[in-house]
Image (cartoon, grey):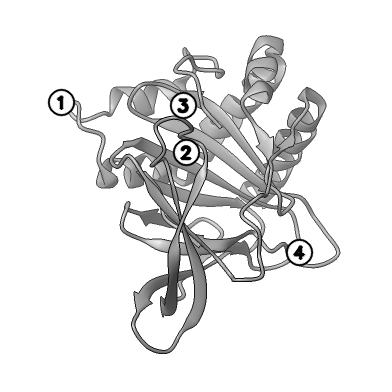
Amino acid sequence: MTDTLASSAPAGHAFLRGITDSRPADGVVDLPWLRGAAQRVQDDPGTFLSWLEEILRNEESVRDAAKRSYWHPNGFAKMVLHASADFRIRLHVWPEAAEPSRGESNPHSHRWEFASTVIAGEGMHMVEYGETAAGGDLHTRYWYGVDPADPAALRRDGQARLKKLRAPHVRYGQVYSCDTEVVHTVRPIDASLTATLVLQGPHRSAKTVVYCLPDQTDDQPNGELTEEDFRVLVGSVVAAFDKRVSS
């Protein structure tokens, strides 16, 4: 999904100003800066909460954010709260369910660096992978962003075996960062409401890789996320985060 460069979030809020004003003097948004920006959420939770509340009170912000947000095929929401030329702020929400979500279950990389922090739920379970000549599990390899005629299409590129390199757990309040070389899967630790705030940098690569098991299809369309969905999801995160920081 393509994001516009106009921000949905109220630009004058102290939380967003603090992040924007802290950008490096050379204008290069890098991974250390993204980690620092994500850490601001935990260092000043009150200001962050008031920013989310201000977004919910602003009908234009809700409408614009909902237009460029969507439901992932595996049942969680990806919402863009702020978008500018050099960084974006996303909110990923896994609603409470009867059993833990599959999350982003296909190993994949990203065209941009990011840092994220868990703001609701127990945390996230990551598994990072690398290709191997022997052992591991066989996957079909796809590239995203390699077809000039259809940049959003996944193009098949043979098969590869993947081995697990490490499996970090990111608990509530912790920050996880990722560069463009990392291939990983992401899922909530448990079935409770789980949310992460993601600080995304600019594109560093024109393409990214996605791996699917041989019996899986690459045709997994996103679902529409309505304005009401946005209000309910962000509102639930506000309530959960407020309860956690107030206890």
The residue carrying pointer 1 sits among few (fewer than 14), some (14 to 19) or many (20 or more) residues within 10 Å by Cα, namely: few
Q: CA distance from mark 2 to mark 3?
A: 9 Å
Element assignment for label 1: loop
Eye-nearest disc, 3 or 4: 4
Residue 66 in the image: above or below residue 104: above
Cα separation between marks 3 and 1: 19 Å
Residue carrying label 3? 15
Q: Is residue 36 left or right of residue 75?
A: left
Give residue 89's position: percent from left, percent from top: 48, 33
Local crowd size for mark 4, using a 10 Å CA cut-off: few (<14), some (14–19), many (≥20): some
Contact, CB < 8 Å: mark 2 with mark 3?
Answer: yes
Cα distance in 3D space between marks 3 and 4: 30 Å
Disc 1 target residue: 25
Task: Select label 2 or label 3 by which is in front.
Answer: 3
CA distance for labels 1 and 4: 42 Å
Gap between marks 2 and 1, in whole Å? 23 Å
Earlier-in-chain disc, 3 versus 1: 3
Left or right of 210: which side holds 196?
A: right
Q: Which residue is mark 4?
A: 191
